[in-house]
């Protein structure tokens, strides 16, 4: 039984920053690669970024590369998404997820959080 809980979403002006957190229950957090996805109204779920088990490897969608940073603290069972230079098109529900290996594909993730709303105003 693995549960994920996102926090840190909110409303921010364009150009601003937010840091999302995802707390993961259980004793096996360090065995999971983690991913962040987002979904805007009427849009497909979109890959944002992923990080491997020890944090040594990260990969990002081209749309967020250079603006977003994924990190993790295995001692705290938490993965983070630091978002800077936010744009209105970043507005979406952001969800974190756990997988056996870092991946861009949502089908590879077996555990999902409920999501947190990020709204970027112009």
Image (tube, rainbow, N blue to C red):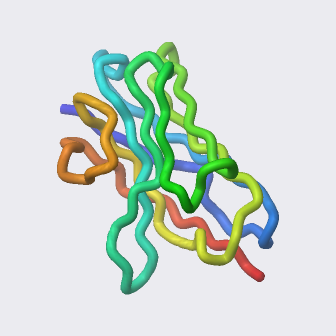
User: Taking 122 as reference, is 28 above or below it?
Assistant: above
- In the image, is 92 to the left or to the right of 3? right
Task: State which quadrant residue 87 falls in.
Answer: bottom right
Q: Indicate the position of residue 32 as horizontal and vertical percent values.
A: 31, 26
- Residue nearest the observer in this picture, 4 or 39: 39
Give whichever of 34, 67 is nearer the camera. 67
Q: Residue furthest bottom?
A: 42
Identify the residue at horizontal 77%, vertical 82% (top origin): 122
Q: Nearer the viewer, residue 119 or 108?
A: 108
Name the residue rendered at 60%, 76% in the picture: 89
In percent of the image, x 40 and y 56: which residue is there? 47
Q: Which residue corresponds to the image point at 74% horizontal and 53% vertical from the top-left? A: 84
Please identify the quarter of the rendering in which residue 97 is found: top left
Residue 34 in the image: state x and y as whole percent: 38, 35
Image quadrant where one finds the N terminus: top left
Q: Position of residue 2 (x, y in %)?
A: 25, 33
Coordinates of residue 48 in the picture (x, y in percent): 47, 54
Numbered circles on residues, count: 0
Residue 56's place in the image compared with 99, above or below, is: above
In front of the other: 100 or 64: 64
- The answer to whether residue 73 is left or right of residue 47 is right
Question: Is 23 drawn above or below residue 72 in the view shown?
Answer: below
């Amino acid at each position: 039984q693995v549960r994920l809980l996102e926090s840190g979403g909110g409303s921010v002006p364009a150009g601003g920053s937010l840091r999302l957190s995802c707390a993961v229950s259980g004793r096996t957090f360090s065995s999971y690669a983690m991913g962040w996805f987002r979904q805007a109204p009427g849009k497909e779920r979109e890959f944002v970024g992923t990080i491997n088990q020890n944090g040594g490897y990260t990969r990002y969608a081209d749309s967020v590369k250079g603006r977003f940073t994924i990190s993790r603290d295995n001692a705290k069972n938490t993965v983070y998404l630091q978002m800077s230079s936010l744009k209105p098109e970043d507005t979406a529900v952001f969800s974190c997820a756990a997988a056996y290996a870092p991946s861009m594909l949502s089908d590879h993730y077996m555990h999902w959080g409920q999501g947190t709303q990020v709204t970027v105003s112009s």
